[in-house]
Image (cartoon, helix red, strand yellow):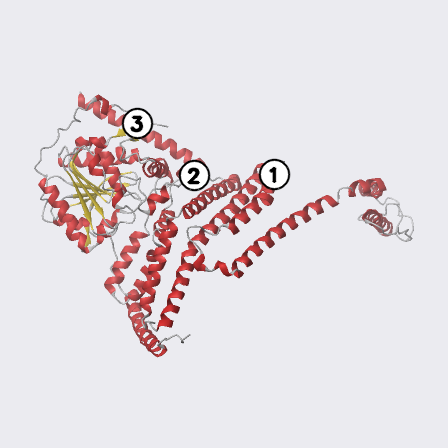
Amino acid sequence: MEQDYPKRSDSQPLLATWIKWTMDFWDSLIQMGPGPTGASPSGASPSGAALPEGAPSPPVLQAAIKMWEAFFSLLSEPQTVSALFQDIHAPSEIILKMAQTGWGAYFHLHRLWLETIRAPSREPKDLRLEGLDQEIFRSWMETYEKDFQRLLNVPQVGLTRLSQEGMNRLADKFYQFQSAMGEFVYTIHLPMKKSLKDMQDLLKTHALQGKVSGDFKDYYKIWIKYLEGDYMTLFQSADFTRAMNKALIAFGDFTLARQEMLADTLRGLPLPTNRDMDELYREVYLLKKQVRELTKMLIKTETSQ
Amino acid sequence: MPPPKIPVDLIMARLAQEAGEARHRLEKARDILMGPLETDIAATPYDVVYEEDRIKLKYYRPARGPQIKTPLLVVSALIHRETILDLQPGRSVVQNLLKEGLEVYLIDWGHPTRKDRWLTIDDHVNGYMDNVIDFIRRRHGLNQINLMGVCMGGNFSLMYGALHPEKIKNLITVVTPSNFDTDKGLLHLWMKEIDADRLVDAFGNLPGDLLNIGLLLLNPARLMFDKYVGFLENMDNQEFVENFIRMEKWIFDTPAVPGETFRQFIKDCYQRNLLIQSRMELGGARVDLQQITMPLLNVYARYDHLVPPEACDRLTQCVGSRDTEDLCLDTGHIGIYVSHKCQKELVPKIARWLKEREGSKEAPAEKPARKKAARKRKPASK
């Protein structure tokens, strides 16, 4: 098979070349083989001898092959290929931008974390329970809201747009829930860190003064008192109340979004959803209330007669 | 700098001694935990004499017959099971009341399910409680009964006493928050900021597990850590283990709270403090504390971390009754039900107080005529 292979300089000729090779391959295959019905498209047998009389020809197969040949010929036209490749870089650029954003955010958070560990002024004893270190969570939420959340809020199109939007809403609420819970768990953890550091300092002082007690229960009791006091200080702070409220709201929103998604997924099954049952329960509740009131009125009327 | 003086030899000797003790304790604990344990709660015999939806009314009869004609209805909170009042022999409020010759009725609010999410405070007070009280009155042929409310049950009892004073002879509130506008007590601080609407819309009923976590967070050092260290140290004591398990059974048997009840309780009580101001409304009727004209005994605990004294001590000044008494006990919120000391102090005081007023004249069966201005029913605010 003699082919005229064009020189490869960029992606456009490469695709055209590939299409041409594909067409030539199928052409040659058809010419070589008898096909599923034993007859070649040209009506000749592979050995070149004429087919016996009465041998059936595959008109449907021939028509299909002709159609594909015409389609691929169109694709290999330079104008068609250049139109195809005009925006081929766009998706890759979008993907690259997303990846860069993600990596950028990750490295920013990583840097903050390293600073937290390395900085000598960030000893646990300096951690004020009244003013919590919110920076890392704030940075994550800012990054998320700026870069990722907008992608999730893009309106969807098509037949399944409602389900897609439900999925995106669930993902959005999940990330917010994770962030809020992370912040809440972090705040709960602070008194533990502070009390342990205070105990370290106390032990060091006692050791220097030669007052180390042989009974560890004494130190345990002291540590529990420190811990209790630190938790009380934390729980009375506005920061903790805000973090707890935020976590509860995020949990509630995530629960709602998950229920909606689940109801949407199970819609095909003969199962009632929470919403269906709530509506039913409300009707039953109102009916029962009405019956009770009417019963009381009836008893009162009968009693007074 | 001189080297630290740490008696390493003493510490090592102590460790060796404690390791031996720990091993011995573990062996004994294994025998106790895998052997028969008496951990039943609410063991005092009772009859269920009335049921409505999830509500059950338990009736306890004193062994030697009633010494007070008027029975006592005890209403506990929705947020915990009523079994705390009959936790274990020797530390049972119910048993001690029976010993004092009182006939006791106790409401079991049960475990709400999803269908109960629409029940409001009005349904509990003017619905279930009213039906229960009418049942008891008919059963005993009385116009009035004695009513005792514990914690949130005390709030319901106050509301009922204000709306139906003609049916209540004497009213007792135990660790009942009536003034929610205080910064003492973490619950009061936290509930002011809670978005009750979003929680109820998301969950329907407030899950018992979520409420449990909130209650444990009130003092995690003691409730989640120190308590279990104490258990490990006393695992070889059978009585301790049994009492501990009984308490655990009660603590983690927290029912869900019906959504609409939770919504109104948080918004109207914790956030707007309407009850003590007599501005709360149930089913279109205003809860006017001045209508509480029957004798009132208000019991609260000095070291209560859930319902601090500041949330309780204004009540007797706001009711219409002239026969009121405050009793502050040196204990905490749970200790008032189960501590040995309080069992000797609280229940005899309640019995004595009720007996002193047993012979007082009953109010007529019909509601007394009230001034039009006070009786005027305002439509419920939206």
Q: Nearer the viewer, residue B69 or A19?
A: B69
In the rendered structure, the answer to whether residue B374 lies left or right of residue B364 reads right
Q: B175 or B284: nearer the eye?
A: B175
| Count of marks overlaid on the render | 3
Kindly give the residue lying farthest to the bottom in the view shown.
B9
Mark 2 burial class by Cα count in 10 Å: few <14, some 14-19, many 20+: some
Q: Residue at x 27, y 67 (%)?
A: B236
Instruction: Kindly identify the residue that appears in the image at 28 percent across and 47 percent down.
Output: B81
Instruction: Label 2: state its secondary structure.
Output: helix
Instruction: Point out the residue furthest to the front here.
Output: B1
* Residue contact at pointers 3 and 1, CB within 8 angstroms: no
Q: Amino acid at mark 2?
A: Arg
Q: Viewed as shown, does residue B348 lie left or right of A93?
A: left
The residue at which mark 3 appears reads as B284
Q: Amino acid at mark 1?
A: Val
Q: Which residue is the site of mark 2?
A: B198
Q: Quadrant of residue B231?
A: bottom left
Q: Quadrant of residue B28?
A: bottom left
Mark 1 and mark 2 on one chain? no
Q: Could you say whether the residue bearing mark 3 is in a helix, strand or loop? A: loop
Q: CA distance from mark 1 to mark 2?
A: 25 Å
Q: Chain of mark 2?
A: B
Q: Position of residue B89 (x, y in %)?
A: 19, 55
Q: Is residue B221 left or right of residue B330?
A: right
Q: Is residue B298 depicted above or below A287 in this figure?
A: below
Q: Mark 3: which amino acid?
A: Gly
Question: How far across and how far down the image is residue B116, in percent?
Answer: 35, 38
